[in-house]
Amino acid sequence: MEASVILPILKKKLAFLSGGKDRRSGLILTIPLCLEQTNMDELSVTLDYLLSIPSEKCKARGFTVIVDGRKSQWNVVKTVVLMLQNVVPAEVSLVCVVKPDEFWDKKVTHFCFWKEKDRLGFEVILVSANKLTRYIEPCQLTEDFGGSLTYDHMDWLNKRLVFEKFTKESTSLLDELALINNGSDKGSQQEKERSVDLNFLPSVDPETVLQTGHELLSELQQRRFNGSDGGVSWSPMDDELLAQPQVMKLLDSLREQYTRYQEVCRQRSKRTQLEEIQQKVMQVVNWLEGPGSEQLRAQWGIGDSIRASQALQQKHEEIESQHSEWFAVYVELNQQIAALLNAGDEEDLVELKSLQQQLSDVCYRQASQLEFRQNLLQAALEFHGVAQDLSQQLDGLLGMLCVDVAPADGASIQQTLKLLEEKLKSVDVGLQGLREKGQGLLDQISNQASWAYGKDVTIENKENVDHIQGVMEDMQLRKQRCEDMVDVRRLKMLQMVQLFKCEEDAAQAVEWLSELLDALLKTHIRLGDDAQETKVLLEKHRKFVDVAQVQNWLSSFSTSSVFE
């Protein structure tokens, strides 16, 4: 029976255990009767509850019952005394009926309790309140009977409710914790998990129950230490009525089971965390080896132009972005695994290290493939960039070669020829750069690793190789055609330079002949006065003719050389 069930009855204080003791160390049970009619059923329930509190050892010393009939009628007193025979006959050693002064003298003659001792099973005495000290020490009597023992019924009742609540909760909690702890200690791992899952959360918070128990024990010990001299109510919360040892025993058992329970929770939490990590690791590994690798396998091309390569780079950045999310999970998992390794048990180290190694291997390989793909696309972009620049140079050179040259003089022809040579040299440098970029790109493709982990997966790179070689061969052919056209243009322009040179020489000869003619006309007009003078003039005339013929021959030679 619990106090909470009969709380309204207990509040009526129909009977109580004050905590006082008689000279035989038996507990004193007080039944304060009042003017109103006492409900015997409620009194019986109260007595049953109160007599269930003391220990068996305490009950063996017997009870002294004080029936306070000073405010009640004789018939009620007699009924209560007779009821004690049925409720606690073997446990009552003495019943003290406190009578009013000279009120029952005549009535008592009709019912002598001492004659009924054998039938009742206990001794009954009628005594006034001031004579109770003959049988019970004053310090064991409450103030109602002139004693010094302080008793607060509501305080006792509240403490009793706390004690019973603690006892009930702690007992139930002990059973639950024992079931949880025992279920985790035996059976297979699967049975462990099933057993723990069913009873993993106790119905009450262990911390709260332990705190309640400690507060209750602390108060009991404080009351026991202070005693009645300290002014604290000395109610039946002593060892024998509240079972302080029982509280201590329950607390010890609770602490033991709760410690084991915490270890079970710690182990399960660690196992759950390990399983969650393992699950996340497998999610990362499965994605990287599955969809992630498929994305990389599908993106094996390098493009056939700058725009195509840039489009592939953009697609690759999207793939890298998706991988980054999983790599972030990898970093988080790696930190969690590292923390567990630092604080983990020996039995988990092997599994944790295996998970960490597996995760690291997969992530590093996938990151290497992403980096390789990025470098390949960057090399392809650079190759196409050089090819485009070279193509533009060749187009410019071809444009110059396709335009007719109409120079004004030899100097402009020399300038144009120099520009052609510079452009041809630039084309040579561009073609050499294209070959270097192309060879580097071909080397990367030839060294391309397998996309799959531990598997030989053939990557179709023939199209890429053919494209690179085709671009280099096409540029080589275009450059060769331009070189041929430059050779023709160079020869033509050199001839034009010589022609301009002949024209200059002819003009110079004409100028010289004109000067010679002018000199001849001005100085060579005399015929001579005699034969000797005429002979001298004739010789001089022959020299003029020789000089003119030499100039004419030189002019004719220069012209014929140009056309040859």
Image: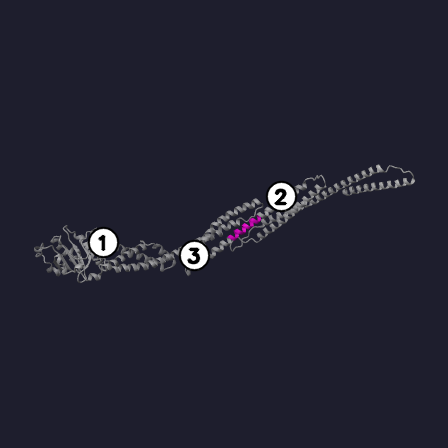
Chief secondary structure of the magenta span? helix
In the image, farthest residue toward the right: 531
Q: CA distance from mark 1 to mark 2?
A: 105 Å
Indicate the quadrant containing the N terminus: top left, top right, bottom left or bottom right.
bottom left
User: In terms of sequence position, does the residue under pointer 3 or pointer 1 come before the other?
Assistant: 1
Q: Which residues are magenta?
A: 367-380
* Coordinates of residue 31 in the picture (x, y in percent): 16, 55
User: In terms of sequence position, does the residue under pointer 1 or pointer 2 come before the other?
Assistant: 1
User: In terms of sequence position, does the residue under pointer 3 or pointer 2 come before the other?
Assistant: 3
Lateral position of residue 452 relative to residue 17, left or right: right
What residue is disc 1 on? 155
Q: CA distance from mark 3 to mark 2?
A: 60 Å
* Coordinates of residue 287 in the picture (x, y in percent): 47, 51
In the image, farthest residue toward the front: 529
* Coordinates of residue 47 in the picture (x, y in percent): 19, 55
**Mark 1 belongs to which amino acid?**
Asp
Q: CA distance from mark 3 to mark 1?
A: 52 Å
**What residue is rendered at 12% in x and 60% in y?**
117
Magenta highlight on residue 383: no
Label 1, secondary structure: give it.
Answer: helix
What residue is disc 2 on? 392
Lateral position of residue 122 relative to residue 490, left or right: left
Quadrant assignment, res 151: bottom left
Q: Nearer the viewer, mark 1 or mark 2?
A: 1
* Coordinates of residue 535 in the picture (x, y in percent): 90, 41
Q: Which mark identifies residue 339? A: 3
